[in-house]
Image (spheres, rainbow, N blue to C red):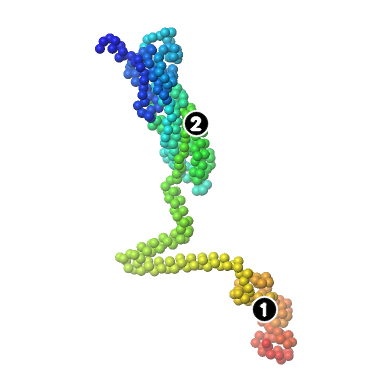
Amino acid sequence: MGILGFIKGQFIDVIDCFEESDDNVFWRFPMNGKDIMMNAQLIVRPAQNAIFVNEGQIADVFQPGTWTLTTQNMPVMTKLKSWKYGFESPFKADVFYVSTRQFTDQLWGTPSPLAISDPEFGGRILIQSRGQFAYRVADPTRFLEEYAGTRESCSTQMLLGYLRGFIVQYLRDGIMESGLGYSALNRQLIEFSDKIAESLAGKFTAIGLELTSFVIQEMELPENLRNAIGRGAEVNLMGGLNTVATLGALDAMKTAAANEGNPAAAMGGGIAMAAMMGQMFGQIGQNMQTGMAQQGGSRTSAQPASDRVQGTPCPECGASVPTGAKFCPDCGKPAVALGNRCGCCSAVVPAGAKFCPECGKPAGLSACPKCGAALAPGVKFCPECGTAKG
């Protein structure tokens, strides 16, 4: 190798770096101990920024394009290095490429369940959540200062763990501040996602990033609560707990009845199953009768007196009062006033009374149809006029 080839091999005259992966957020240009020649070519591709760093201090930032490195377009490096005008010597510096494109489809999720208060479940429950977000590097210099440090490179996967940490923190705080339960949160996922995104935006900006999208895709109950809700819905569809218990007992009895190895158990299971089915169908029939009676109750008053079930005659109007009724269906007199006429004074004697409330005569006396004299029970002729008892 000649002297010119040796000198050329010790210096860098073109700085150009392709992204090794779509996941690269920033990476250091490999200097390999070489110096950068003054008037070297710097190539910055679209959606990239190139940043010169001198001994840990961020210097000049170059936007997309092809640049010839001179003291004129490196004012910060010129100041840091104390270069004079027209400086032409090679120099040392670190060059970082930062991708400014948008990184989409970044997935996040709660590593462990979050405890929230839920009025529908009557206390605290655990939920898990997941979703996705997108971001880009909006301020490359701040991003290198706040996050890069001494790293040689950074991928989206390396950055994801850091970002997920405060996403989950802000999500938990947002849920607690909202006071919403599980069902309400799921009904408002879009609105709640926007609210969390607003809270997160400042955290991203503080490290030179811009949060361009944030979505909560799902909030999920633990498996035991999901199973409980499913069982509750099944019970309601089947008609309630009593029906489910009855069907469960029938299944158990069918198993016992089919037990060929134990005839006694099979017989007992069959008898019990028959009894259970009879009881179940009897209950169904009773419910149907109750429903029909309730439906027909509103039509009773519209039926003529002759169509009603015969009962005690009303002493006021003579209509038949059904057994157990509290009022006469025709005249409306209270049932307490329904009874027989006193045989002496013709006053109404309440049912079950032993004496007439008007004349005080025993309630069992009747009156002579001719002279009106009181007749004792069992007497066939009036003791006053001799008239035969009617």
Residue sitting at x 43%, y 12%: 71
Report how far apart the C-alphas of labels 1 and 2 lie in the structure.
91 Å
Residue sitting at x 31%, y 66%: 260
Q: Position of residue 54 (x, y in %)?
A: 41, 16
On the image, numbered disc 2 is attached to which residue? 201
Q: Amino acid at mark 2?
A: Ala
The disc placed on residue 182 is none
Q: Position of residue 63 (x, y in %)?
A: 44, 20
Q: Amino acid at mark 1?
A: Asn
Q: Is 358 left, or right, of 27 in this rendering?
A: right
What is the quadrant of the C terminus in the image? Answer: bottom right
Residue sitting at x 73%, y 90%: 385
Choose between 187 and 230: the one closer to the eye.
187
Q: Is 140 left, or right, of 366 in this rendering?
A: left
Q: Is 176 left, or right, of 20 in this rendering?
A: right
The image quadrant of residue 99 is top left
Choose between 128 and 13: the one closer to the eye.
13
In the displayed structure, would residue 356 be above or below residue 70? below
**Count of numbered circles in the view:** 2
Earlier-in-chain disc, 1 versus 2: 2
Q: Position of residue 33 (x, y in %)?
A: 33, 17
Confirm whether residue 165 shows in the render: no
Classify 10 Å Cα crowding around label 1: few (below 14), some (14-19), many (20 and above).
many
What secondary structure is marked by label 2?
Answer: helix
Marks 2 and 1: in contact by CB < 8 Å? no
On the image, numbered disc 1 is attached to which residue? 340
What secondary structure is marked by label 1?
Answer: strand
What is the quadrant of the N terminus in the image? Answer: top left
Q: Position of residue 262 (x, y in %)?
A: 32, 66
In the displayed structure, would residue 111 be above or below residue 297? above
Q: Nearer the viewer, mark 1 or mark 2?
A: 2
